[in-house]
Image (cartoon, helix red, strand yellow):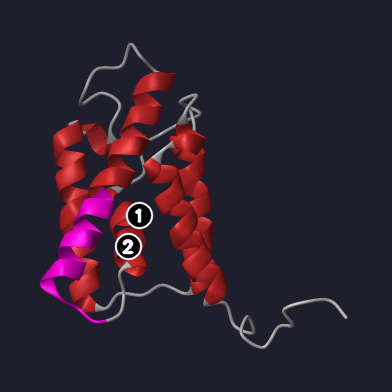
Amino acid sequence: MSAYICNPEHIGVLAAYAMRGSITKERIFEAQELAKLLMSENIRSVAYRYPDDEDGCRGYEGMKDKLLIRAAVDDAARFLQNGTWLPALHIIKLCDALEYQSCETPDYEHSFAYRQLMKIKSIAICNLPGYDEAPWSYD
């Protein structure tokens, strides 16, 4: 299988990373909505790539689509509330992996999920060690 559904924790930790900072009910809700968006796009990609696979046969460990989405939403809230932050480089790699697994549809690069994933990646890049000290231009 060249495209697969990422596990819910993969999605949840990315959504939580995007919302890190002060923990409020609104931030938790935003992280959950982002997790739902990213998991739904990943599922859409795999369903497009493998149109004959039925719900529950294409998912992570045989889980139905709704359960995958629910698990990603729950994981996003859990990671955000626990302050589970991976290093920036790890987040960038997770973004690359999710992008690769979600890019099967012809309109992926125009999707809201793609734009949100690129924002997460940008946040992580800005958090790389030495980023703030690097020159803004070449002189």
Q: Give, as a single range, the part of the protein colored magenta.
A: 22-35
Label count reads 2
Label 2 with label 1: CB-CB less than 8 Å: yes
Residue that label 2 marks: 13
Q: Nearer the viewer, residue 39 or 106?
A: 106
| Label 2 environment density (alpha carbons within 10 Å; few <14, some 14–19, many ≥20) | many
| Rendered location of residue 114, percent (x, y) | 45, 44
Residue depicted at x 47% and y 64%: 91
Q: Is residue 114 left or right of residue 53?
A: right
In the image, what residue occupies the spot 84% across and 76% down? 138
Residue name at image x 61 percent, y 85 percent:
132
Which residue does the image show at 28% across and 53% down from the upper left?
34
Secondary structure at numbered mark 1 = helix
Distance between mark 2 and mark 1 Cα atoms: 6 Å
Residue 104 at x, y percent in the picture: 48, 27
Is 71 one of the magenta-colored residues? no
Seen from this angle, which residue lies furthest bottom? 133
Q: Is residue 8 placed above or below 15 in the rendered structure?
A: above
Q: Which mark is residue 10?
A: 1
Up/down of 116 relative to 133, above or below? above
Other residues around mark 1 within 10 Å, as few (<14) / some (14–19) / many (≥20): many
